[in-house]
Image: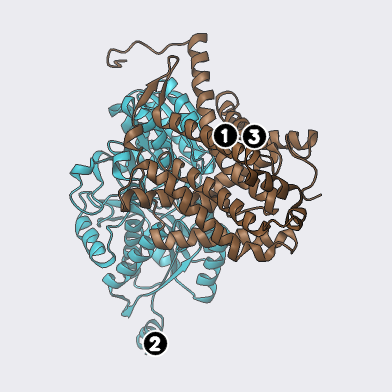
Chain colours: A brown, B cyan
Amino acid sequence: MERGGKPPPLHGPLMDIQFIFVQLFNGLVLGAFYILLSLGLTIIFGMLGVVNFAHGAIYMLGAYAAYTVMEVYSGSFWMAVLFSGIIVGLIGMVIESTLLRKLYDLPHFYNLLLTFGMMIFIEELIRIIYSPIGKPFGTPKEFLGSIDLGFMLFPKYRLFILGITTFLAIGIWLFIVKTKLGSIIRAGTDDSQMVDALGIDISKIFTLVFGMGAGLAGMAGALAAPLQNIYPYMGMSILTETFVVVIIGGMGSIIGSIIGGIIIGELITLGVIFWPPLAHILIYIFMAVILLIRPRGLFGRAKFFE
Amino acid sequence: MVILGVSYAMAKEPVKVGVISVLSGPLAVVGKGEADAAKMAVEEYGSVLGEKVELIIKDHAYSPGLAVERAKELYEKEKVDVIIACPNSAAALGVSDQAFKNKRLFISTSAGTTDLVARNPYTIKWNYNDYMLATTVGLWGAEHLGKRWYTITADYAWGHDLLKHFTTALKMKGGEHLGNDMVAVGTADYSPYILKAAKANPDVLVLLNVGKDAVNSTKAAVEYGLKKKAKIVHALLFEVDIKGAGIDLFTDNYVAASWNWQVDNPGAREFADRFYKRFGDRPHFMAAGVYSATWQYLEAVKRAGSKEQVAVIKALRNHTFRDMFANPGFIRAEDHLQIGKAYLLRVKKAADVKEKEDFFEIAGTLSAEEAHPSVNFFGRKVGEF
């Protein structure tokens, strides 16, 4: 074969180890999205006790917000990510303070119904505004091309995703663990009535937490936009996998989300390399095993739905 | 008196055409084109047997269950003489069974499964089919694009079917199949699969998937540089996906097709322009198939001089026609498969797009005999009425 003078492809163990490294590294990027999404899902669940089925639709909103910032107002990609976090976070706060709030005293399944309805509502609204045809979103100019990491060539944009996710995850962790507001949130996760009794306006905290979770999902959507097509239903499949992450990590646990996200990203990748027929169901098998050994997930604590 | 009686009965009963398509949900963009094409065909044809043709359009929302309900309504309540279109293979198979039960014609234009070929005497398979798409890619591609091929396949019946026919065609032309990955529909990040494909160092990457999966797998191939090293061929690629993801993503990719408005058929261009003037877009190949099937059905009614089912089906059998869709088209009596030429299209550069939906150039043409399965390929006959 004429391959433009290139040497024939390497085979044997060296190539294989390199190949697996590339794949594992790529699995981290997959995991990054699960981390960003499950962080929001798990904080909202931990504090508000709400299983947010609209989380995938909120992620999609983030992608459309980024598209609008970039295309319509010709902003930079950095601005697009930042603004989509802020815009979608604000939308989340409005949803919490006008709709979700009214359902906290009712059984869980009412807010399930509400968030499920919100999902359909948001998706159809976007479909009407932006048309059911997707929108193009190329790799941002700043991140075109690849970087040689020594053992492989890796797309710059995927490295950027890894960087920004690490930054955000550490930021969230520091915020929750090191700040006063964070300690109130942690206290609220354990016993919101007690926090309320201590004279702290818990409802404001609830709004903030929901807004934060939505904002993270929004940023994830903005970051995903260059990797895949934007379209109104893009949040559907990733939501299922995000729930798996949250269940494996333990509902309400931040560290669980991070570890769970990495595990799922790598499991999918390893499945593709070694057991392709199992690749799609491997994560569910893993989840079932975790639930058998640790019914509350890896880092879950007793409380929720118990 | 007798003649008067007959013409009176005809005047009372116009030909009724039913169309089932997807008019809600994410795929409604495709279904709208089909509904529009049916409207245009019925209006432009005018009247047959001295009466204006009636058209009833129903939405199955891409659900096989709903499709069967709609078929029952159309055949039993509305008493339509024919149902045309119906995307989604499972849905079309359900409608075909209803056609057989009700002894009324179904012309499947929009579902690819070859299970519709020679299924029963009341079903005719029009337009593209899976064998044709996969074989066109394999036969033409192995000759013109390279010998080392890697496939990424949508993991459901349709993808498996395509893969089977594709590998057969590829081997016939001495191509080498380096590997395949079955990928779940709706996978957002194809990068692990693309990395695997890139490792095999193929000349050509075939994407046996459709819609968002075609978009997302191409995106990953661009990102990891595979698009620069290998040619990419799609089994199916819709204009809406090119519009949605931007033409740059697909430039120089190839796709198999039964039709494009730029093919050299009499009236193809004019049909596309009339369609564009009226509905704002140029028609996709599914819409063209619906227009052609509707038109040729009405022609058959005219030839039979009656809308009686068996007479019309017999008028369609072994019939050669030339229209905007097929030049020539032929409906085989043995297995009720409409055959015509097949095309390999290449996606243009953005700079070369001169008008609306001007996305493709024709890179290759296959004869009907090459592209379609032989008469006895599936070992079935349509059976008795």
The percent coordinates of residue B148 (x first, y second) are 38, 22
Q: Nearer the viewer, mark 2 or mark 1?
A: 1
Element carrying mark 2:
helix
The percent coordinates of residue A155 (x first, y second) are 40, 27
Which residue carries the number 1 mark? Answer: A170
Residue at figure coordinates x 38%, y 22% from the top left: A147
The percent coordinates of residue B351 (x first, y second) are 19, 43
Q: Which amino acid does label 2 sit on?
A: Gly
Residue at figure coordinates x 54%, y 61% from the top left: A94
Q: Distance between the residues labelled 3 and 1?
A: 16 Å
Q: Nearer the viewer, residue B164 or A299?
A: A299
Q: Nearer the viewer, mark 3 or mark 1?
A: 1
Instruction: Indicate the quadrant containing the N terminus of chain B: top left, top right, bottom left or bottom right.
Output: bottom left
Element carrying mark 1:
helix
Q: Which chain carries label 1?
A: A
The percent coordinates of residue A116 (x first, y second) are 61, 59
Tag 3 and tag 1 share a subunit: yes
Choose the circle earlier in sequence order: 3 or 1.
1
Element carrying mark 3:
helix
Which residue carries the number 3 mark? Answer: A260
Which residue carries the number 2 mark? Answer: B5
Q: Distance between the residues labelled 2 and 1?
A: 87 Å
Q: Check whether the beta carbons of the residues at disc 3 and disc 1 lie within 8 A of each other.
A: no
